[in-house]
Structures are given as C-alpha cells and as structure tokens.
Amino acid sequence: MGEATDKLKAAGNKLAGNVKESIGKATDNASLEAEGKAQKVKGAGQDVKGPVKGALGDDI
C-alpha cells in the first residue's frame, strides 16, 4: 500500500469513527461511542503512517 492509500484509509476511519461516536452519544450507547473513539484513533495512526511510508518507501 502506498502513502495515498494510507491517507484514504485514515480519512475513512476518522469519518466512520466520528459518525459512530455521534450516534453513540445521541442514543446513549456507550459501547458504540467508545468504538467510534477507537476508530478515530486508528485513523490518526494511519495519518502518521502514510507520510513515514512515503519518506522511507513502501518497503516497510
């Protein structure tokens, strides 16, 4: 996977996380809210991974 793919996955995970977190808050579903927060963190990690892979090459 390349840097662009990681950026797209990061954006998707952050968006899905925001949606899940919002729905969890609106429906008072703590489990869904926590799942959304975790997915946003995963997206943030992928945001970091993309540029690192771009700088080092796709071999990592």
Image (cartoon, grey):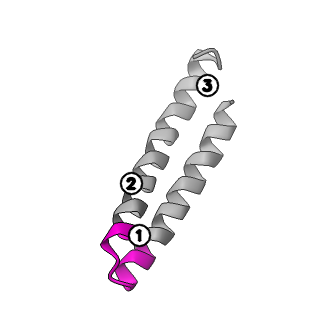
- The picture quadrant where one finds residue 2 is top right
Does the magenta segment cover residue 26?
yes
The image quadrant where one finds the C terminus is top right
Q: Could you say where residue 44 lies in the image, as x and y percent from the top left? A: 45, 46
What is the distance, in whole Å, between disc 2 and disc 1 at their CAs? 9 Å
First in residue order: circle 3 vs circle 1: 1
Residue matched to label 2: 38
Residue 17 vertical placement versus 27 (above, below)? above
Q: Could you say where residue 52 lies in the image, as x and y percent from the top left? A: 52, 25
Q: Residue at x 47, y 62 (%)?
A: 17
For label 1, the SS is: helix
Residue matched to label 3: 54
28 or 18, nearer to the observer: 28
Magenta segment: 22-33
Q: Residue at x 61, y 25 (%)?
A: 54
Which-is-in-front pick, marks 3 and 2? 2
First in residue order: circle 2 vs circle 1: 1
What is the distance, in whole Å, between disc 3 and disc 1 at their CAs? 30 Å
SS assignment for the magenta stretch, majority: helix
